[in-house]
Amino acid sequence: MIKFFEKAPYSPVEYCYDVEEILFKCKSKFQEIMVVKNPYFGKMLILDEVVQLTERDEFFYHEMLVHIAMFAHPNPRKVVVIGGGDGGALREVLKHRTVEKVYFVEIDEEVINISKRFLPTVACSIDDPRVEIKIMDGAEFIIKRNHSDIDVVIIDSTDIIGFARTLFTSDFFNSVKKCLTNNGMFVTHTESLHFHKDMVIEIQETLKSVFQIVDLYTAPIATYPGNWWAFAIASNSLSPREVRHNFDIKTKYYDKEIHLQSFMTPSLYEKLLHKKLEW
Ligand code: SAM
């Protein structure tokens, strides 16, 4: 069987996957896009030799990226999803009946087209009438926006290198803050607490210089290097640790208990920020 060796940036490991079949491979204007089939994980979306999702475990990441912020917000109606061209985050956002509008801001249109073709269970909500697709850099979209009308901003980008870097600067976070409503929530993935602790801390610190409330929660992701995946969540008024409306959607992993348990304990969080955790 053919092998695919993942070259994930800044990780001390290299993963090797069996490939039953290469279903698609092309070079878009922005990146190399590949869809392969693995006997355990099913179809896998790979961008520039980095695994983005697999059919088998994508729900852990997409549910945890989306629902903590969506349930911490009392009434999320307008949402921005940046990146996430596969449509997985969008699918989860649209499970919330309160949602009236989602701006789906993906820099690479090809990722959307290929996901619709090869990953229909992930890309199933892209054509929902509540979705407005914007093919552009997410930072540009946010910086140009001059109303404070967005309830939740979600970053589902590639790793923090190349064109995704614009989504992790303090200028960008300041612009996010300006476009959020008073109860608005911002959430982003921030790599692995095992392998990328310094990067996780740096993003927390940058967010703290912009938002009143900043927190960290984690989720177990089988296919991201380090597996113990960290998410940063920020807001100006509401703690993200509370569930503020009825749990009335279908999920496989996320639920009210997971919502509360996924946050780092306050003492561990303090130690992390003061760089007293040695691993
Ligand atoms: N869940 C995945 C992960 O963390 O590995 C991310 C999946 S999703 C396919 C990532 C998407 O972010 C890609 O399609 C990429 O084109 C998009 N992206 C990266 N930087 C971006 C930016 N600055 N603006 C908009 N989209 C961006």
Image: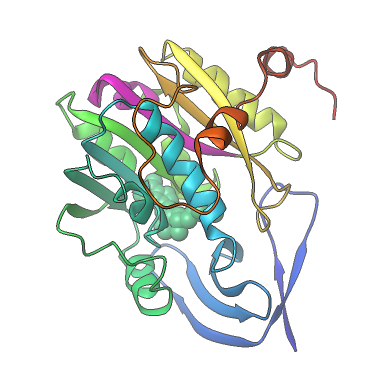
- Residue drawn at point x = 34 percent, y = 30 percent: 245
* Corner quadrant of residue 29: bottom left
* Corner quadrant of residue 41: bottom right
- Residue drawn at point x = 35 percent, y = 61 percent: 108
**Could you say which is closer to the camera, residue 152 or residue 141?**
152
Q: Is residue 109 left or right of residue 13?
A: left
Q: Position of residue 270 (x, y in %)?
A: 68, 12
Instruction: Please state the total of marks drawn on the protein image.
Output: 0
Q: Position of residue 53 (x, y in %)?
A: 54, 62
**Could you say which is closer to the camera, residue 254 or residue 29?**
254
Image quadrant occupied by the C terminus: top right
The stretch of residues the image draws in magenta is 173-190
Of all residues, the one furthest to the right in this rendering is 278
- Residue drawn at point x = 68 percent, y = 81 percent: 39
Placement of 232 over or under 112, stated as above or below: above
Image quadrant occupied by the N terminus: bottom right
**Could you say which is closer to the camera, residue 188 or residue 257?**
257
Q: Position of residue 119 (x, y in %)?
A: 43, 73
Q: Is residue 248 left or right of residue 226?
A: left
Q: Is residue 22 left or right of residue 153?
A: right
Q: Is residue 113 magenta?
A: no
Q: Position of residue 37 (x, y in %)?
A: 59, 81
* Corner quadrant of residue 135: bottom left
Q: Main secondary structure of the magenta part?
A: strand
Placement of 240 over or under 102, stated as above or below: above
Q: Is residue 155 left or right of residue 128?
A: right
Residue 158 visible in image: no
